[in-house]
Image: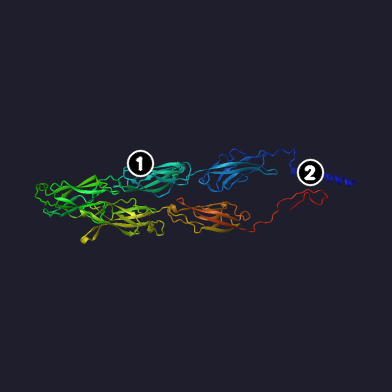
Amino acid sequence: MHLRQMSTSSMSSIAWGLILALCVYDKPCESQALNKAPQFLPGGDMARFSLPEDTQVGSVVYQLRGIDSESSNVHYSISGEQFTVDRSTGVVTLLRTLDREDTDLIEVIINEGISGSEPNTVSLRREISVIDVNDNAPLFNDRPYSFVVPETTRIGAILYSNVTLSDADGGVNSDIMLTCVDHGDDVCQTFDVAPEKIQEGQFIGIISLIKPLDFEQYSSYTLVLRATDLASDPSKRLTAIANVAIEVKDIQDQAPIFLNSPYSVTTAEGSPPGTSIFTVKARDGDVGDPRKVVLSLEEDHLNYFSLVPVESPGQDSVVTTAHLVTSNNTLDREHPDILQSGGIYTFKIKATEMINNEVPGDETTSQVIIVITDIDDQVPTFNQQSFDINVSEDIGVDTPLPGLNMVVDDKDVGENSHYSLKLRDVENSDGVFTIHPQSSLGRTPVVIKVADIKKLDYDVTDINLRKMVFDVIASMKGEKGKEKEVSSSRVTVHLLDANDNLPQFALSSYRFRVSEDVKPGKLISNLSATDKDSGNFGKLSYAIKGFGAEKFSTDPVHGGLYVAEKSKGLDYESQISYSLTFEAHDGGGRVATVNLFVEVEDVNDNTPVFEESKYTRTVREGATSFEPQLFV
């Protein structure tokens, strides 16, 4: 009986001990003090925090700092895939490249907590501003640029406003200054360029006239524009160049001109009536929209001569031609007026424009001198022996070669100043260009136009095809009417590259199989693209986009697909495949993309595990089962 009571007493003591242990270790007793939450310290909670977009991946960018009033150890965490934080120290490190042009505000949630039997956490939502840096050059859009301007356009007039520019940066980095690059031809003294801001990073270039135009002096210009952004650090400002082809349109502002003046010839006295002395040719001085010209004689007081109009089939209707012939009044050198002038007889030929073929308009006169001297001792000559010009490969068909100001001049008179012009291929120019005019008299500007744009291709394997050389040949009629080459000028055309090719991938899509145990930084494929353009237009950069892209990386310059070095690697049990987009950007802003499909292969990398690391139950003495039941 005594032993049974002792056993009951012992059992009671054990039960009270278990209850006490549960009070201490399992649940807080009512008398236990309240567990307070930790707090972020000022300057350690990412308030008003910002980062430049060129911050290097892997850089320490911030340190979270907090405190727990109960002196417990705090730990930190941060949401998203842009940053990582050291759990213990609060040091925040950048994981992924920043690009303000893609994302200018990053939202994260930072957490501060304490460990123990009663975890307690405080969370704050923060917005991190990405600060712009000047990493995008201005871009000329919708090229090529060209326009036609009448030569009578008033000074100050706006000529062209279709030059569109953009800069992907922000703030002052996206403001653009537009200037003219002086390369001769008086272009920067003739035209003014100015940018007009539409919105941040969007501008139009306005071209206006600041000096009178003269078609007869310059029939075309090439205006070179330089766009420079206004980054606060002048040494980091970026630029872009574009050409504007300007054609000057001829307007009725010139009097008629004689094509073969001055007129000075020899004829014997007593020449029979109807003897041809020379031929007169005249046309409107405006070559763009010429009027008909009528010829007449003035101050022929002795009526020695008359004009006989010439209308030859197929003759250029712009040019008026007439023969000066002797009249029925026989030439008499002994006439007192002629003797007094030393055997010289002078008078004038007048060329008059006809408005609508009826009303007389502007007129020009040319003096005629009948003398006993004149020999054909002049040949047509060019204003330069050679011309070297640059032409963009995207020039349009039938467009005059910009910057080519060629003039042919024969200082003889009459038919003696007639010559023919043709092109002769020297290197790669056969059939590419045409010449205008093909024949002329006296002084004539020469225009070379593009006939076959298919041969103007900078993106060729043989770089020698980027240069074209031809001769402009001037010929005169020699003995028996045969053409004789008398002078020439060589033209060398250098093709300039235009950004007319997209980057190209070898396949339309790519599929890869990667084992889940591959190490971070491992190369999966030497994936890259090609671009036929040259220079900066052919320089490529690469990027990976898509859900799960943080698991992979690429070399921005050389391409390739890698397992990201700073990732935790691939895990078949977490994600078995990835569908990504691989981008190739060229230096002119053109982008090509290709789809990537990466399949993760499973490996035997998981051992069996218990759901709990420790199982605990309380059982009364003598019981045969756990209450509640214990499952492992």
Q: Based on the displayed image, in which of its 4 quarters is residue 570 positioned?
A: bottom right
Q: Nearer the viewer, residue 12 or 131?
A: 131
Q: Based on the displayed image, in which of its 4 quarters is residue 237 positioned?
A: top left
Labels 2 and 1 touching (C-beta < 8 A): no
Q: Residue 553 in the image: state x and y as whole percent.
A: 54, 53
Q: Dot 1 lies on which element? A: loop
Q: Residue 277 in the image: state x and y as whole percent.
A: 16, 53
Neighbour tally class for label 1: few under 14, some 14-19, many 20 plus, Cα within 10 Å: few
Q: Residue 535 in the image: state x and y as whole percent.
A: 43, 53
Q: Nearer the viewer, residue 42 or 392?
A: 392
For residue 19, which numbered disc appears in the image? 2
Q: Is residue 125 left or right of residue 370?
A: right
Q: Dot 2 lies on which element? A: helix
Q: Residue at x 12, y 52 (%)?
A: 328
Q: Residue 308 in the image: state x and y as whole percent.
A: 19, 52
Give the distance between the C-alpha atoms of the residues marked 2 and 1, in whole angstroms: 98 Å
Among all residues in the image, which is located at the extreme front?
Answer: 358
Q: Residue at x 76, y 51 (%)?
A: 630
Q: Is residue 413 left or right of residue 532?
A: left
Q: Is residue 617 left or right of residue 446?
A: right
Tell me if I can see residue 526 in this picture: no
Q: Amino acid at mark 1?
A: Ala
Residue position for label 1: 157
Q: Is residue 403 left or right of residue 374?
A: right
Q: Amino acid at mark 2?
A: Ile
Earlier sequence position, callout 2 versus callout 1:
2
